[in-house]
Image: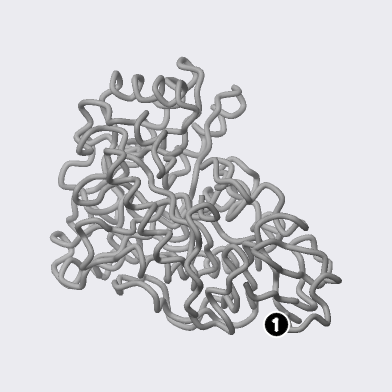
Amino acid sequence: MTSYLISGAELPNGTRADVAIRDGHFVDPSEVSGRKGTVLVGASGLIALPGLVDLHTHLRQPGLEQAETILSGSQSGALGGFTALHAMANTDPVADTAGITDAVARMGREAGYVTVRPVGAITTGLAGEELSAMAAMAAGPGAVRVFSDDGKCVHDSLVMRRALEQAKALGVVVAQHSQDPRLTIDAHMNEGALSSRLGVVGWPAVAEESIVARDVLLAEYVGTRLHVCHVSTAGSVDVIRWAKKRGIAVTAEVTPHHLLLTEDLVGSFDPLFKVNPPLRTAEDTRALRAALADGIIDIVATDHAPHPSESKECAFGEAAFGMVGLEMALPVVIETLVNPGLLTWSDVARVFSSAPAAIGSLAGYDAPLAVGSPAHLTLVDPTTAALAPRGSLSSNNPYPENVLPGRVMFTFHHGRATVSNGELVAPDVVSAEASR
């Protein structure tokens, strides 16, 4: 493997230092300095972050390869600075058996750009009726540690209780898509004055908040962990704050789009801005930023949801829900939280790397950038505008091009460069053992 000496990077704590990589791990710079074959990377002006981890990615394979493949999604992730992606289960067929989750992990290893961790379905076929083969998926080569029916809510209270009990026995986490289906029938956008004015069926905040409230109480009763996906309302933040103060083991994520975009954009009826949960009010957006800054919301997760053009280039009411997000996640957070002073770079390392890795029980991220740790590294230029997404097969990008700050210049996964000088490069295939 190639050795690297990265000189003059700014670490998350604000100090400047050289960073060295050899044999897939961080080493003392003296071990590679002056050695034949060492690649020198000038990193003055760049921020060195531990490799980013996304707990919520839709890679679409198997079955929906016209929107994304594990390879293309992995490439998009690498361009965004990610070194690990958790692939959601709403594929075709659904990832509700060990055979499918093991295959997803294998395809991720073959792609080689990032570590792909499969997320197993909570219920068979995402139907919300009977539990999937959770134990088999957890024990298989895919080593599933996160289970979610994302895209659908486990709305039956008894099924959710049983899922939490099974998760407790297995030492895994259930990640809930909080959406009361009865309150969101035919809904397309946030419910409020704007939806009434536009004549669009609204999606009330309480449809999310009521499920979050129920589930934190169930988690407390069962005595296990709960993870809340894509929090989008100020009311949900209040519930999660209450639950954490009470000592309930709940974690939560916020998406980049809910940190930046608001329901006002839906007034254009551009399907790019149709997403589940919907874009909310400016008040909700401010509450979400504050909650991420003060730790009530634990992590940023992209909810990268690629769709083929025919699913978005149509009438708003017929369009699919979802946005791509892997390549713009870090720039959005720099724009909305770092530059205004709400998050430090150490905070960014936490919400994008160590915290999601801990929730997903992903090894190798507990001592980021430390000598001896796996060399997962992202070098970002915080002042240069990010390029429009290039890696995904889909183009449903809601963000303005060449405006948001934060261009990823280098990404290293297990010591292999997957992005160099802002361009994708082909890595060596990561071994199964290293990827695990």
Q: Does 65 sit left or right of 39 as displayed?
A: left
Q: Does 429 sit left or right of 248 as displayed?
A: left
The quarter of the rendered structure image containing the N terminus is bottom right
- Residue 76 on image: x %, y %: 42, 70
Q: Nearer the viewer, residue 434 or 308?
A: 434
Q: Which residue is mark 1?
A: 39
Give the farthest residue toward the top.
221
Q: Residue at x 77, y 63 (%)?
A: 27
Task: Describe the element under mark 1 as helix, strand or loop.
Answer: strand
Q: Is residue 46 something that shows in the picture?
A: yes
Q: Residues within 10 Å of mark 1 (few under 14, many from 20)?
A: some
Q: Does 365 sit left or right of 122 as displayed?
A: right
**Image quadrant in which you'd find residue 107:** bottom left
**Image quadrant in which you'd find residue 34:** bottom right
Q: Is residue 41 something that shows in the picture?
A: no
- Residue 81 on image: x %, y %: 55, 68
Position of 349 relative to 146 (above/below): below
**Image quadrant in which you'd find residue 412:** bottom right
- Residue 295 on image: x %, y %: 63, 43
Q: Amino acid at mark 1?
A: Val
Q: Nearer the viewer, residue 168 or 5?
A: 5
Q: Nearer the viewer, residue 382 or 208?
A: 382
Q: Nearer the viewer, residue 106 or 409?
A: 106
Position of 157 relative to 59 (above/below): above
Position of 416 relative to 129 (above/below): below
Q: Does 73 sit left or right of 385 as displayed?
A: left
- Residue 30 on image: x %, y %: 86, 71
Q: Residue at x 65, y 51 (%)?
A: 350
